[in-house]
Image (cartoon, helix red, strand yellow):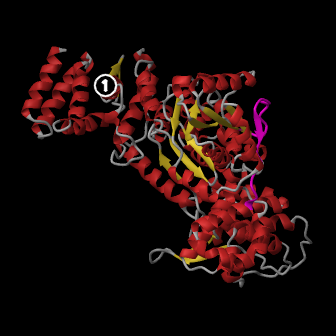
């Protein structure tokens, strides 16, 4: 490392502590905004004993893997219990059992959310096997020692990197399963080229799935639903099994709330979309009803006045386009006397009073439509798309941050309709504008969360930007600091390092550091801290980025389960290296005739908190002792000053002061 390569300091007046406090507030507000209007049954998640996280998505599983290259975790006990009462037998399940009777490995090929996981688990349970979920970063690294005899393993290979000759991977898995006495079912996508041991998956009928789950969740509804089955079939027939399960949960919840069956059926998203098609064809609809519907599909959850103002702005844009084709002398009637009730009645929107006085009424979508309404309007109204894009581009620069977030989220959802179009209209242009970096992050995160296939396209885009122009690298750094990076931590950390190494600007180091802190979760903690510890041995920009990120991690609310305690990280040498690096950059330094201010001055105050806890916490004391024992010459005077300061403030005792000073002198 050379001192001349120090990142250029920022010129803003906001301190690092103030910035971290603002970021934590933004994180909370962002979480609130994401949740606004999401009133559809959303599945569940649970922490596995090996450190993994399994997210239930109807009848499919999404697994966020822990640190090991190969890991196994049990399926959710509730999911296994439901198979006995809710499983709808299919031809693929019967064929799977037949195949597994004679072979140790079978591939179940089909679409995500089509019930593959349930089918595979049902087959394994029918064979009397103990079920586990198997995960691997590289399928070729699975060994017999990773598996147990008389156990059935569910392996999701949708996102796995297959060898150039995928048949050889299947042979290797078969050899491993045979040697261990285990059975493996691998879930593979419909386009998988493997031909050995493949069972094509046939999803069960959605209505059958719905009826099974209703009988399980709310048996009292079964008889009453019989007379509505014909109507239900119209809206459920084309659904995926996961969606049918979600509908059953919605009906069961509605029953507990005392809702009428006809009301619940009318609230089905598919019924609502059918009605939407009819409303769009009405010739006598209020002239501002359609703009209000589009505005509500984007800004749902916000106050009525905000939604209405945006609707009027959209209507004005549409009117401008219409006037290009109209007779300029033709008179148009005024629409100022149209009532809100007319707009609400036309659409599937609803209104409710705000929680406190002065908040106004809030506009919301009906259950299940939050993620469906805008894409449906986009598909049904192709002529309005250019105006819609211009209107959304205006909303993302609005003064109201809530409008910015909702508009960016909407643009991300539109990327699921046609990624190339949205990429060309929004993502690529925004990647060149520093001012659009945060809005771009929100849009890309929304797109990735909305669809797994689109997530792959987003990640491909970000990989290119990580080696692109300065603004593109900034956009990639911020975008990976979201759910995108949490789902692909290794990829995100590689991009963060690439971006940090290539910059000499403190602002970019700080943006990377913020994103590193954003992807710090129970499942990623080990990798994040290990990577940051490695950066402390690199060049100045790597060290500064590691220091800025570590200070953020120490500042996180440690009492929250989402943020694993730093004190528990192993190896402890990583923590010592990270503390030493952060404290070093917490001091000012002189390069030539120029003096640089401290980059992470908050690190000394944060260390004071750890020193105070060390008096009663042996783990913290061991960490502090380790840090002091390897303090470099640059830090020894500062350490001595702060130890005396903390003793005078009663942060540490006189006995601890003496012990810590001896550690410094003995070094």
Q: Main secondary structure of the magenta part?
A: loop
* Label 1: how many Cα within 10 Å (few below 14, some 14–19, many 20+): many
Looking at this view, is 145 or 633 the one in front?
145
Looking at this view, is 99 or 140 the one in front?
99
Residue 592 counted in the magenta span: no
Q: Percent from the top left, x then y, of residue 198?
A: 76, 35
Q: Quadrant of residue 543?
A: top left
Task: Tell me which residue sits at (46%, 34%) in the image.
Answer: 513
Q: Percent from the top left, x then y, of residue 140?
A: 63, 22
Residue picked out by circle 1: 576
The C terminus: image quadrant = top left
Q: Quadrant of residue 254?
A: bottom right
Q: Is residue 502 visible?
A: no
Task: Tell me which residue sits at (73%, 56%) in the image.
Answer: 240
Q: Viewed as shown, does residue 565 lie left or right of 539?
A: left
Q: Is residue 343 above or below residue 139?
A: below
Q: Is residue 56 above or below residue 304?
A: above
The N terminus: image quadrant = top left
Q: Which range of residues does the magenta coloring cover?
A: 188-206
Residue 205 counted in the magenta span: yes
Identify the secondary structure beneath mark 1: helix
Q: Viewed as shown, does residue 23 lie left or right of 405?
A: left
Task: Tell me which residue sits at (31%, 37%) in the image.
Answer: 602
Looking at this view, is 645 or 30 the one in front?
30
- The residue lying furthest to the left in this view is 654
């Amino acid at each position: 490392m050379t001192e001349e390569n120090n990142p250029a300091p920022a010129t803003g007046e906001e301190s690092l502590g103030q910035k971290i406090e603002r970021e934590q507030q933004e994180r909370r507000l962002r979480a609130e905004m994401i949740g606004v209007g999401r009133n559809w049954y959303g599945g569940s998640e649970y922490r596995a004993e090996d450190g993994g996280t399994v997210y239930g998505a109807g009848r499919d599983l999404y697994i966020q893997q822990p640190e090991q290259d190969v890991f196994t975790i049990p399926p959710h006990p509730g999911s296994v219990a439901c198979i006995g009462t809710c499983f709808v037998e299919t031809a693929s399940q019967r064929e799977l059992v037949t195949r597994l009777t004679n072979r140790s490995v079978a591939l179940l090929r089909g679409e995500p959310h089509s019930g593959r996981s349930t089918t595979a688990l049902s087959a394994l349970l029918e064979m009397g096997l103990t079920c586990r979920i198997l995960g691997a970063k590289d399928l070729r690294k699975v060994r017999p020692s990773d598996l147990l005899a008389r156990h059935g393993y569910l392996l999701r290979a949708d996102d796995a990197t297959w060898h150039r000759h995928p048949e050889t991977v299947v042979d290797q898995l078969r050899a491993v399963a045979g040697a261990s006495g285990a059975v493996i079912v691998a879930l593979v996508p419909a386009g998988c080229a493997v031909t050995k041991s493949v069972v094509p998956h046939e999803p069960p009928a959605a209505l059958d799935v719905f009826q099974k789950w209703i009988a399980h969740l709310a048996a009292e509804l079964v008889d009453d639903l019989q007379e509505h089955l014909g109507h239900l079939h119209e809206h459920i027939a084309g659904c995926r099994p996961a969606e049918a399960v979600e509908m059953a949960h919605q009906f069961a919840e509605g029953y507990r709330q005392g809702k009428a069956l006809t009301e619940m059926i009318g609230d089905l998203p598919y019924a609502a979309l059918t009605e939407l098609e009819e409303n769009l064809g009405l010739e006598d609809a209020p002239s501002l009803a359609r703009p209000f519907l589009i505005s509500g599909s984007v800004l749902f959850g916000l106050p009525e006045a905000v939604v209405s103002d945006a609707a009027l702005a959209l209507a004005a844009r549409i009117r401008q386009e219409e006037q290009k084709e109209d007779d300029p002398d033709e008179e148009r009637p005024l629409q100022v006397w149209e009532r809100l009730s007319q707009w609400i009645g036309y659409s599937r929107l609803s209104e409710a009073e705000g929680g406190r006085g002065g908040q106004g009424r809030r506009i919301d979508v009906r259950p299940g439509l939050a993620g469906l309404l805008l894409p449906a309007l986009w598909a049904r109204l192709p002529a309005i798309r250019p105006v819609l894009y211009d209107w959304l581009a205006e909303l993302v620069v609005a003064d109201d941050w809530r409008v910015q977030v909702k508009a960016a989220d909407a643009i991300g959802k539109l990327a699921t309709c046609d990624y190339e179009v949205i990429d060309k209209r929004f993502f690529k242009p925004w990647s060149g504008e520093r001012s659009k970096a945060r809005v771009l992050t929100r849009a890309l995160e929304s797109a990735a969360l909305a669809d797994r296939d689109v997530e792959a396209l987003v990640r491909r885009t970000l990989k290119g930007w990580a080696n692109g122009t300065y603004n593109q690298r900034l956009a990639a750094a911020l975008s990976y600091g979201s759910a995108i990076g949490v789902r692909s931590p290794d990829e995100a950390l590689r991009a963060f390092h690439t971006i940090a190494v290539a910059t000499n600007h403190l602002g970019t180091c700080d943006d990377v550091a913020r994103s590193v802190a954003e992807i710090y979760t129970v499942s990623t903690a080990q990798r994040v801290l290990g990577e940051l510890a490695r950066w402390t041995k690199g060049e100045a920009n790597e060290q500064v980025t590691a220091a800025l990120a570590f200070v953020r991690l120490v500042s996180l609310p440690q009492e929250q389960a989402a943020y694993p305690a730093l004190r528990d990280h192993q190896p402890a040498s990583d923590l010592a290296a990270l503390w030493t690096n952060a404290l070093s950059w917490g001091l000012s330094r002189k390069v030539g005739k120029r003096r640089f201010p401290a980059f992470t001055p908050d690190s000394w105050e944060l260390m004071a908190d750890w020193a105070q806890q060390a008096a009663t916490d042996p783990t913290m004391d061991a960490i502090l002792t380790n840090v002091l024992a390897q303090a470099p010459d640059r830090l020894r005077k500062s350490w001595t000053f702060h130890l005396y300061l903390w003793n005078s403030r009663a942060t540490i005792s006189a006995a601890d002061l003496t012990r810590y000073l001896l550690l410094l002198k003995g070094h």
